[in-house]
Image (cartoon, rainbow, N blue to C red):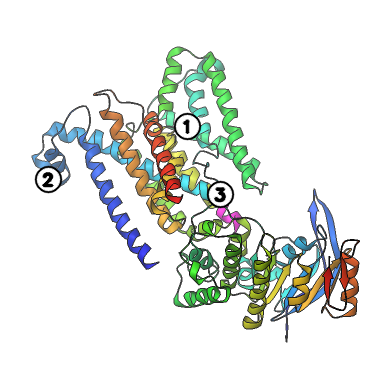
Amino acid sequence: MQFSHKKNHSSFTFLILLLIAFVFLNVSTGSLSIPFKDICNTFFNSSIVNKNYQYIITNYRLPKSCTSVLTGIGLGISGLLMQTYFRNPLAGPFVLGISSGASLGVAILIMGGNFFGFLSYLNGFSIPIAASLGSFLVLSIVMITARNIRNTMSILIIGLMFGSFTSAIISILSYFSTASELQQYIFWSFGSLSNLQWKEIYLLFAIIVVSSIGLLTIIKPLDALLLGENYAKSIGVSLKRIQSTVFIITSLLTGSITAFVGPIAFIGLAIPHITKLIFKTSNHKTLIPAVAIIGAIVMLVCDTISHISLGNKNLPINAITSLFGAPVVIWLLVSKSKKNN
Amino acid sequence: MSYPVLKLKNVTIGYKVTKQPKTICKNLNLELYQGELICLLGRNGSGKSTFLKTVGNMLPYLKGSIQISNIDYSKLNAIEFAKNIAVVLTESLPENSLSVFETIALGRQPYTNWLGKTTETDSKIIANAMKLTDTHNLKNQFIHQLSDGQLQRVMIARALAQDTPIILLDEPTSHLDIHHKINVFKILRKISQETNKTILISTHEINLALKNANRLLIINNDEFKIGKSNEDHIQKNLACVFNSDDITYDIKSNQFLF
């Protein structure tokens, strides 16, 4: 035990250093190359830096890095919570219908004009609001349907069914929409980390802080759930309370992230797997901070790749997360089973 | 065997199927004592699991009252139940990377703080649980690496670590070979003698039950009979429940022949 604790400490130190390094790397890459010296000076001694550089860094690159970090933390934690709660490695932050709800809200806003006969009014806030309303609506329907169901597997399937249902509605809307509306919707569904101003980042940060406080109260029951619901109940866990806490935290985190940056695929599903393969534990006291840090690192890497790969054109973040993330998870799983044999 | 740990008074047990209650047994009166090893015997579908789930507070009872150390079930909250009754279930564990030590330590959850930090007292109790079940050498292995026999001992150790006056086990020997079956019964008997805990096991191993149990609890057509294996009415009920063309109860040697 002693040994593994020490090992965890050094892993955490290493990961935090890696995170800081990737924040610098992320800030220093982009269509305009800014000397590394100027980047350091922006943080530590801003008076001697070229005003243009400083403007780009504080108003464009740094917010983007912060958004990446917060998105990675939030989606990583949500994914872990869902996988532990449902005891299913295929569960992710979106199984409760949050991303399908957000997509539906945004699809109706952008493409529903023709269909329902209203004029779409788009500004900086209308998309996050439509996404929040949509996810809140679908999430509530899933929750109400699942209220009296004790079998967690059925809740999982209900979530998936609502996903297919909403995507069917979106298909119908797309069929009747114009090319430019469709393009606008598809661009939203690619996800974007660069739309957030500092005000929104503070809001996202506050939501993550509040959720983390909630998380502290369920570390123990989450560990108990590793033995299954009946054993958890037999050691004093209130299944109703843990269910509502897990669902509220996940909806807060994923709901707000989806509203601001779009439906970021894959990260929530993959980060917990990567973390478990690295730390080889199921203990949530270790796993929760670990998924947060690893989630942040992976998002930063994906964001960095997305804007260095094609010169001054940014690739969609959603494509990058899956394109580079999926092989990593497959590789980790294959090398793990090789070791076991 | 001084005072009754568990008392059932006029209890009706059963479960609800689409709002229609299905009754297993009415007016059940029972008292289980400290340090007893009791084996629950009955055919498949006779209600053994329903009875265990009811006593383990996983299923509500329909009428009457059940008391632990003279406190009614209705007055106990989840944590107090966890401090009174530990269970070993038949269900398989979800996939996880828990070590044997961590699994056993989970039994201390009703006593630990909000982070689940184990104190020195907790460590002593865990160490003792590992000693009684001979799981000390498995401590650092992952539970998914264990054989069925090892895993069952670990789950018994986990229940022991919960430090409860009562332990319920639902068919603890069902996947095990004959050596491990005997071993599990030996461990359970040792625990009941050394720790003075009340242990209630549902089992199909009638011969091992006859040999090891202090008392037998037999379910015969919706009726519960409890008593020592050498008592007349118990032997009659045993013969009545299990005798058939293929298997007979031999009173002289006090075992079933097949």
Q: Give the magenta part as a residue range.
A: A238-243
Q: Give coordinates of residue A289: x percent, y percent.
A: 38, 53
For mark 2, what is the residue? A45
Q: Give coordinates of residue A193: x percent, y percent.
A: 34, 33
> Is residue A202 something one can see in this rendering?
no
For mark 3, what is the residue? A87
Q: Are marks 3 and 1 on the same chain?
A: yes
Verify CB contact (< 8 Å) between mark 1 and mark 2: no
Depicted B215 relative to depicted A131: above or below: below
Residue at the (57%, 18%) spot, across then down:
A172
Q: Which mark is residue A131?
A: 1
Classify residue A175 as left or right of residue B45. Answer: left
Classify residue B224 as left or right of residue A106. Answer: right
Q: Chain letter of disc 1?
A: A
Q: Chain letter of disc 2?
A: A
Q: In the picture, residue A204 is in which quadrant?
A: top left
Mark 2 and mark 3: span between their CA atoms? 49 Å
Q: Secondary structure at mark 2?
A: loop
Seen from the viewer's position, the closer of residues A170 and B99 is B99
Query: How many neighbours does mark 3 have within 10 angstroms: few (below 14), some (14-19), or many (20 or more)?
Result: many
Q: Give coordinates of residue A300: x percent, y percent.
A: 31, 39
Looking at the rendered structure, the kind of residue marked 3 is Arg
Query: How many neighbours does mark 1 have within 10 angstroms: few (below 14), some (14-19), or many (20 or more)?
Result: many
